[in-house]
Image: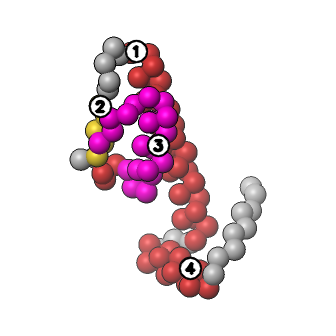
Protein backbone atom coordinates (compact mmCIF):
# COMPACT_ATOMS: atom_id res chain seq x y z
CA UNK A 1 0.00 0.00 0.00
CA UNK A 2 1.26 3.49 -0.87
CA UNK A 3 0.66 6.85 0.78
CA UNK A 4 -0.71 9.94 -0.94
CA UNK A 5 0.39 13.31 0.45
CA UNK A 6 -1.74 16.33 -0.30
CA UNK A 7 -1.24 19.85 1.06
CA UNK A 8 -4.39 21.82 1.83
CA UNK A 9 -5.07 25.04 3.69
CA UNK A 10 -6.29 24.94 7.31
CA UNK A 11 -9.93 25.70 6.45
CA UNK A 12 -10.13 22.92 3.85
CA UNK A 13 -8.56 20.50 6.30
CA UNK A 14 -11.07 21.46 8.99
CA UNK A 15 -14.01 20.99 6.60
CA UNK A 16 -12.78 17.61 5.39
CA UNK A 17 -12.22 16.35 8.93
CA UNK A 18 -15.72 17.47 9.92
CA UNK A 19 -17.25 15.83 6.86
CA UNK A 20 -15.44 12.57 7.57
CA UNK A 21 -16.52 12.64 11.23
CA UNK A 22 -20.15 13.26 10.22
CA UNK A 23 -19.96 10.29 7.84
CA UNK A 24 -18.37 8.12 10.52
CA UNK A 25 -15.24 7.51 8.48
CA UNK A 26 -11.71 8.82 8.00
CA UNK A 27 -10.33 11.30 5.50
CA UNK A 28 -8.20 8.51 4.02
CA UNK A 29 -11.26 6.32 3.52
CA UNK A 30 -13.10 9.20 1.84
CA UNK A 31 -10.20 9.78 -0.58
CA UNK A 32 -9.98 6.04 -1.32
CA UNK A 33 -13.74 5.92 -2.04
CA UNK A 34 -13.49 8.98 -4.30
CA UNK A 35 -10.65 7.48 -6.32
CA UNK A 36 -12.44 4.14 -6.69
CA UNK A 37 -15.68 5.82 -7.76
CA UNK A 38 -13.79 7.87 -10.34
CA UNK A 39 -12.35 4.67 -11.82
CA UNK A 40 -15.82 3.05 -11.94
CA UNK A 41 -17.28 6.08 -13.73
CA UNK A 42 -14.45 6.05 -16.26
CA UNK A 43 -15.01 2.33 -16.87
CA UNK A 44 -18.74 2.86 -17.49
CA UNK A 45 -18.02 5.82 -19.78
CA UNK A 46 -15.66 3.64 -21.84
CA UNK A 47 -18.38 0.98 -22.07
CA UNK A 48 -20.83 3.54 -23.50
CA UNK A 49 -18.24 4.67 -26.06
CA UNK A 50 -17.49 1.07 -27.11
CA UNK A 51 -21.21 0.36 -27.45
CA UNK A 52 -21.65 3.48 -29.60
CA UNK A 53 -18.72 2.53 -31.83
CA UNK A 54 -19.98 -1.04 -32.19
CA UNK A 55 -23.43 0.15 -33.27
CA UNK A 56 -22.00 2.74 -35.70
CA UNK A 57 -25.35 4.55 -35.98
CA UNK A 58 -26.12 6.47 -39.16
CA UNK A 59 -27.67 9.35 -37.22
CA UNK A 60 -26.67 11.28 -34.13
CA UNK A 61 -27.29 9.50 -30.86
CA UNK A 62 -28.81 11.23 -27.84
CA UNK A 63 -27.72 10.23 -24.35
CA UNK A 64 -29.84 11.04 -21.33
CA UNK A 65 -28.59 10.53 -17.78
CA UNK A 66 -30.24 11.00 -14.42
CA UNK A 67 -28.52 13.79 -12.51
CA UNK A 68 -28.38 11.62 -9.40
CA UNK A 69 -26.32 9.04 -11.29
CA UNK A 70 -23.47 11.47 -11.89
CA UNK A 71 -22.57 12.60 -8.39
CA UNK A 72 -19.53 14.86 -8.97
CA UNK A 73 -18.51 13.29 -12.28
CA UNK A 74 -21.01 14.92 -14.64
CA UNK A 75 -18.69 17.39 -16.39
CA UNK A 76 -15.89 14.85 -16.81
CA UNK A 77 -18.21 12.14 -18.17
CA UNK A 78 -19.90 14.56 -20.55
CA UNK A 79 -16.56 15.80 -21.89
CA UNK A 80 -15.27 12.26 -22.51
CA UNK A 81 -18.47 11.25 -24.32
CA UNK A 82 -18.39 14.40 -26.45
CA UNK A 83 -14.78 13.72 -27.45
CA UNK A 84 -15.90 10.25 -28.60
CA UNK A 85 -18.53 11.76 -30.89
CA UNK A 86 -21.63 11.64 -28.67
CA UNK A 87 -22.68 15.26 -28.94
CA UNK A 88 -26.31 15.22 -27.75
CA UNK A 89 -25.96 14.60 -24.02
CA UNK A 90 -28.68 15.62 -21.61
CA UNK A 91 -29.29 15.18 -17.93
CA UNK A 92 -32.75 14.68 -16.52
Q: What colour scheme was applied to this rendering of the protein? A: secondary structure
Give the labeled residue for mark 2: 62
**Left or right side of 62 for 38:** right
Residue corresponding to mark 3: 79
Magenta region: which residues?
70-90
C-alpha distance separating marks 3 and 1: 20 Å
Q: Earlier in the sequence, mark 3 or mark 2?
A: 2
Residue at mark 4 to residue at mark 2: CA–CA distance = 39 Å
Report which residue position mark 4 lands on.
12
Residue drawn at point x = 45 percent, y = 19 percent: 53
Tell me: 33 left or right of 70: right
Q: Which mark is in front, 4 or 2?
A: 2
Q: Earlier in the sequence, mark 4 or mark 3?
A: 4
- Out of 65 and 14, give the one closest to the viewer: 65
Of the numbered discs 2 and 1, the one sitting upstream in the chain is 1
| On screen, residue 49 above or below 15 | above
- From mark 3 to mark 2, how far is it between C-alphas? 14 Å
Callouts 3 and 1 close, C-beta under 8 Å? no
Q: Is there a contact, CB below 8 Å, between mark 3 and mark 2?
A: no
Amino acid sequence: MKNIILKVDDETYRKVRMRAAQAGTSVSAMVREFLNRDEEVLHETRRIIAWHQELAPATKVSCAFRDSGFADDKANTTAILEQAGLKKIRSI
